[in-house]
Image (tube, helix red, strand yellow):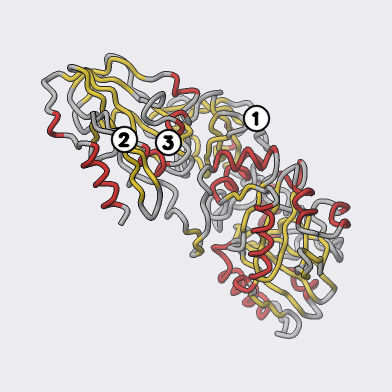
């Protein structure tokens, strides 16, 4: 056996952060999230505080979604930062604290480049420093995610306000007390699917406070879970990971990433191009697929997708789904082959595996 | 028969069974006449973590010493299991196909992988004794 033949990068490091890939058994952590409750430390996610009198005007011009209905106590849902060609720089989440103060969560690998891009656009679009100020507070704060049907019990154990149970998905409670101390906010959100299917909360807190919260959550019965489980959970739901499933050379139409789009919005960077792709069509589509029941060979980023003898696409993410007891994945295939139910073959270590295109979520 | 030992290092505890031989690539071997049963060690399964997929050779398949005969896959990694001798596969542990996690639960028992019939006399001195294998783990983890 050769333990050196590892895939998937450095164990323990993601975007420069040393973080827990797993706590011994990522598959169990996955199942536990779906059936009970787990706690993730997702402090590697980039976090900004955005202040100024013109933050609404500014973000309306730089993100893919119409923000006119965005209001206090709400998260925006994922919104895209696009380049001029309509390619995806990042998907980010905005939090409306008050009219002149928002928060943003961005993907870890882009924490520096997103801020640079926003500042570049601020200058280019004629906004001043005081109109829009962007502070990177990533290292100063923590983000703890409590996910799963039993999440409310853990929130009780953390002495979180009762009011959080009334939060709708993508709403938050600012300055919420947790364990007797004020946290920045508690939101009904996550990236596991449980935020939609059952309960998921995320707590934004100072570093020491966050550590205390994580520890108490584990003591109260939440199983600690790492990045590997987070990845397999999001993949079952069909959530895209920037850098894997989308990037600067992918547009949201071919990625079929509808959630962050307001079609017809023209007054944002890259939005006109998105509309053009939508109207004129694209040559590939992102699809989800499942292997046959019991087929556990894992397709990896870059695995080729065939229809008979013809190569028609490639895999961008793959994993073993503990819920379906088979491997699943997503990737891009020619639009001529991108139909729900269409049968394809995916190459894993030189062997072809039967796969069927399925709609998201895959479970 | 040598007794079992538990190797304790800074990074973990690993059982080394005293009743069998080992390879430098973390397989264990139970040799009976010309037939060898092969599995991976407790140390190896703990490094690989939760195994979700196993690809086994078919009976009748000819294997060459040092070449991959089986593949184990966890969510984030893939590892080959090498044939310890030239020979022919006589049986693979098909129960693992639906329950690959058995390798994690019982690496030295129900988690065995395949049996190979050696085509020549087996030279046991090529393999590691339990003491030598325990020493290998200690070295790797210091």
- For the residues beneath circles 2 and 3, the answer to whether they share a chain is yes
Q: Residues within 10 Å of mark 3 (few under 14, many from 20)?
A: many
Callout 3 touching callout 1 (CB < 8 Å): no
Q: Which residue is at the front of the view, A14 or A244?
A: A14
Callout 2 touching callout 1 (CB < 8 Å): no
Q: Quadrant of the C terminus of chain A?
A: top right
User: Which residue is under mark 1?
Assistant: A340
Image position, residue A318 (x, y; %) = 52, 40
**Which chain is indicated by disc 2?**
B
Please indicate, yes or no, whether residue A211 appears anywhere in the rendered image. Answer: yes
Q: Residues within 10 Å of mark 1 (few under 14, many from 20)?
A: few
Mark closer to the observer (2, 3): 2
User: Which residue is under mark 2?
Assistant: B4
Which element is circle 3 on? strand
Whole-angstrom CA distance, mark 2 to mark 3, is: 27 Å
Which element is circle 1 on? loop
User: Which residue is under mark 3?
Assistant: B73
**Which chain is indicated by disc 3?**
B
* Residue A48 picture quarter: bottom right
Which element is circle 2 on? loop
């Amino acid at each position: 056996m050769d333990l050196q033949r590892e895939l998937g990068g450095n164990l323990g490091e993601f975007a420069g952060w040393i973080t827990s890939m797993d706590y011994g058994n990522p598959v169990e952590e996955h199942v536990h999230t779906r059936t009970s409750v787990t706690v993730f430390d997702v402090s590697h996610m980039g976090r900004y505080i955005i202040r100024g009198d013109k933050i609404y005007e500014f973000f309306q011009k730089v993100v893919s979604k119409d923000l006119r209905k965005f209001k206090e106590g709400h998260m925006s849902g994922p919104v895209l930062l696009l380049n001029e060609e309509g390619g995806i720089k990042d998907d980010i989440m905005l939090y409306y604290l008050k009219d002149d103060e928002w928060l943003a969560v961005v993907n870890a690998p882009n924490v520096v480049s997103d801020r640079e891009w926003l500042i570049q656009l601020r200058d280019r679009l004629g906004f001043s420093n005081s109109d829009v100020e962007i502070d990177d507070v990533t290292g100063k704060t923590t983000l703890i995610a409590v996910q799963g049907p039993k999440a409310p019990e853990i929130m009780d154990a953390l002495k979180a306000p009762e009011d959080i149970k009334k939060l709708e998905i993508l709403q938050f409670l600012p300055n919420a007390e947790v364990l007797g101390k004020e946290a920045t906010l508690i939101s009904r959100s996550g990236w596991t699917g449980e935020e939609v299917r059952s309960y998921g909360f995320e707590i934004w807190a100072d570093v020491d406070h966050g550590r205390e919260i994580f520890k108490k959550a584990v003591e109260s019965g939440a199983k600690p879970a790492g990045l590997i489980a987070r990845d397999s959970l999001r993949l079952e739901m069909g959530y895209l990971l920037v850098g894997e499933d989308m990037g600067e050379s992918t547009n949201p139409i071919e990625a079929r990433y509808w959630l962050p789009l307001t079609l017809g919005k023209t007054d944002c960077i890259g939005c006109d191009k998105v509309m053009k792709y939508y109207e004129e069509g694209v040559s590939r589509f992102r699809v989800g697929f499942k292997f046959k029941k019991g087929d556990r060979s894992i397709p990896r980023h870059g695995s080729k997708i065939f229809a008979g003898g013809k190569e028609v696409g490639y895999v961008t993410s793959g994993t073993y789904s503990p819920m379906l007891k088979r491997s699943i994945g997503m990737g891009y295939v020619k639009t001529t082959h991108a139909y729900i139910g269409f049968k394809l073959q995916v190459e894993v270590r030189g062997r072809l595996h039967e796969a069927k295109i399925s709609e998201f979520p895959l479970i | 028969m040598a007794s079992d030992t538990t190797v304790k290092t800074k990074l973990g505890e690993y059982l080394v069974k005293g009743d069998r031989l080992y390879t430098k690539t973390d397989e264990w071997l139970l040799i009976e006449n010309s037939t060898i049963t092969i599995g991976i060690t407790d140390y190896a399964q703990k490094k690989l973590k939760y195994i979700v997929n196993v690809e086994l050779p078919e009976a009748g398949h000819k294997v060459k010493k040092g070449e991959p005969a089986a593949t184990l896959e966890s969510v984030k990694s893939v590892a080959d299991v090498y044939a310890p001798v030239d020979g022919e596969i006589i049986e693979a542990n098909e129960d693992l196909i639906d329950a690959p996690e058995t390798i994690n639960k019982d690496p030295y028992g129900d988690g065995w992988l395949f049996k190979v019939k050696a085509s020549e006399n087996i030279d046991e001195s090529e393999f590691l004794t339990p003491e030598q294998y325990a020493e290998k783990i200690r070295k790797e983890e210091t």
